[in-house]
Image: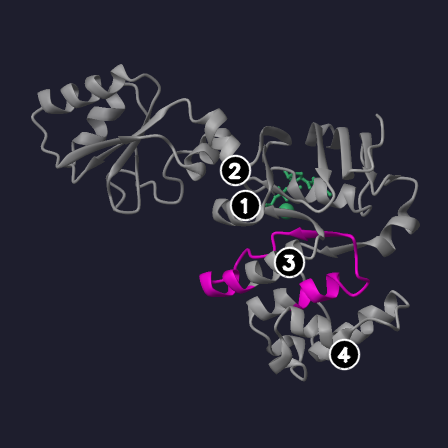
Amino acid sequence: MTQNPEYAIEVTNLTRRYKGFAAVDDISFTVRKGEVFALLGPNGAGKTTTVEIINTIRKPTSGKVTLLGMDVTQKKYKIIPRIGVLPQGFSTFDRITVKETLQYYSRLFCNPNTDINGLIALVNLQDKVKVQYRNLSGGLKQRLGIAVALVNDPEVVFLDEPTTGLDPRARREVWKVLLGLKKKGKTLFLTTHYMEEAELLADTVAIVAKGKITAMGSPGELIENNANYLVAMLKSVDENVFEIVRNMGLAPAYDSQGHIKVRLTHTEDVRRLLNTVKDSGASFAGLDVRKPNLEEVFLKLTDEPLAQGFVRIKGAE
Ligand SMILES: Nc1ncnc2c1ncn2[C@@H]1O[C@H](COP(=O)(O)OP(=O)(O)OP(=O)(O)O)[C@@H](O)[C@H]1O
Ligand SMILES: [Mg+2]
């Protein structure tokens, strides 16, 4: 592999096995300097394993990973001062304050010049400098974790699920901080479950499932290249319609409003669906057919049902 100075990260044929099971299965990609790159995938997809190999914490089984031009298995001590890491489920000492936490981590990096107050302002924790870690809310803890990841003024920052478990408002506050870092030209490597997060922050999104990258590109390209089917939505349907659609060999799912959503591969399926439901005598208020959005593309590429999280099993209510 040729090393290109334009790239912050180059991953080639990376595999990580645990007793024969491939948690990461022969993946390759590059991350340009200054871009925000997101690994988007469900639980167990291999996101953390990938991140922790790139940031030198775990070892690969095979393949080659270069970070800032250096091989991650050979140049750990040169790499670590130049990167920052927010691990999944970040936690730190319970009984020291926000300011003390940042002072402590900056000492670990032997960095007496860290602008602690600047960092506190960057993550908007000015009102909390004297609050102990244990008394911060989840969103504030994550923002402190981001500040910790920045104490050595890193060129590349890894953020493993920075907003999981946060409420929508706290999530937006974290996004604001990350957008600020993006503006400053930091390279950000992010993992997330949230489509909305990837879409808002990332220049490039790699969708991962079962250790493989199933699609990669800008959010716009992902839709363009993978929306080769239609999503039909049947509104205000009566109870029988779900079963009727399923009997057509389709895979219906309820969405959050109780409408039935179904993927249609061919345009003639629209007519077939409409006729079958009409012929059954079941009543319904309308049928919408449209191209899938990014979330629906993601669910398809990760092999998950359309209305994941909202699927109601008939008769279970
Ligand atoms: N140290 C380990 N030993 C054995 N199996 C492991 C180990 N670490 C991870 N795995 C397995 O590898 C797979 C990928 O795990 P990983 O933590 O990388 O996924 P993830 O995408 O980060 O998931 P999540 O969204 O839940 O954080 C999972 O099946 C996990 O159980
Ligand atoms: Mg993980």
Give the extent of the magenta segment: 144-173
Q: Is residue 111 left or right of residue 194?
A: right
> Which is closer to the viewer, label 2 or label 4?
2
Count neighbours of disc 4 (C-alpha within 10 A) and say few if under 14, some if 14 to 19, many if 20 or more.
some
At 75% from the left edge and 30% from the top edge, which residue is drawn?
Answer: 15
User: First in sequence: mark 2 or mark 4?
Assistant: 4
Q: How far separated are the C-alphas under marks 2 and 4?
A: 39 Å
Residue that badge 3 annotates: 89
Asked if marks 1 and 4 touch (Cβ < 8 Å), the reply is no
Residue that badge 4 annotates: 100
Local SS, label 1: helix
Q: Which mark is residue 219?
A: 2
Q: Is residue 135 left or right of residue 230?
A: right
Question: Is the shortest distance between ligand 2 and the CB of mark 4 under 8 Å?
Answer: no
Label 3 is placed on what type of residue?
Gly
Asked if marks 2 and 1 touch (Cβ < 8 Å), the reply is yes
Q: How far separated are the C-alphas under marks 4 and 3?
A: 20 Å
Count neighbours of disc 3 (C-alpha within 10 A) and say few if under 14, some if 14 to 19, many if 20 or more.
some
- Residue 26 included in the magenta stretch of the image: no
Image: 46 above or below 81: above
Q: How far separated are the C-alphas under marks 1 and 4?
A: 32 Å
Local SS, label 2: helix
State how the image is colored.
one colour
Report ligand 1 position as a quadrant. Answer: top right
